[in-house]
Each structure stands twice: as C-alpha cells, then as structure tokens.
Amino acid sequence: MRSLLAKTAEAASRGEFEPFKTSSIFDSTAQNPDWLGEEPQRLQQLMSA
C-alpha cells in the first residue's frame, strides 16, 4: 500500500486525475446557477455595500 501511495502522491497532490473535484466541469449547479435562486435581500444588501 505504501508503495502505491508513493507512486501516486505527486499526481494526487495536484488533483490531476480528479477534474470532478478540482473544476466546475461536472458541477451541474455551476452550469445552471438559476437553480440556486436569488440571494436573500439581506445578502444582496451586504454585496452592494
């Protein structure tokens, strides 16, 4: 097990083979932000300040 982890440590540290974790390519919500709806009024006020 240690040998296998040592061989994959460098690629794993960069997330090279995990684009579903390190990008928005597979994130359906990122591709459809309207699913989240409007921010509550309180947050809209904070963002405009």
Image (cartoon, rainbow, N blue to C red):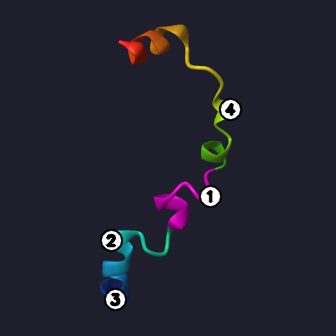
Between the C-alphas of marks 3 and 4, the distance is 42 Å
The residue range painted magenta reads: 19-27
Q: How dense is the environment of label 2, judged by Cα within 10 Å: few (below 14), some, or many (20 and up)?
A: few
- Label 3 vs label 4, nearer the camera: 4
- The amino acid sitting under disc 3 is Lys
Q: Which residue is disc 2 drawn over? A: 13
The mark nearer the N terminus, 1 or 4, is 1
Question: The residue tagged with tag 2: helix, strand or loop?
Answer: helix
Question: Do callouts 4 and 2 mark residues in contact (Cβ within 8 Å)?
Answer: no
Between the C-alphas of marks 4 and 2, the distance is 33 Å
**Residue 44 horizontal side relative to residue 49, left or right:** right
Residue 26 numbered tag: 1
The mark nearer the N terminus, 3 or 4, is 3
Name the spot of residue 14 as percent of width and height, x first: 35, 70
Question: Do callouts 1 and 4 mark residues in contact (Cβ within 8 Å)?
Answer: no
Residue at 46% of width from left, 60% of height from top? 22
Between the C-alphas of marks 2 and 1, the distance is 20 Å
Question: The residue tagged with tag 1: helix, strand or loop?
Answer: loop
Name the spot of residue 33 as percent of width and height, x first: 64, 36
Q: Which residue is disc 4 drawn over? A: 34
Residue at 37% of width from left, 83% of height from top? 8
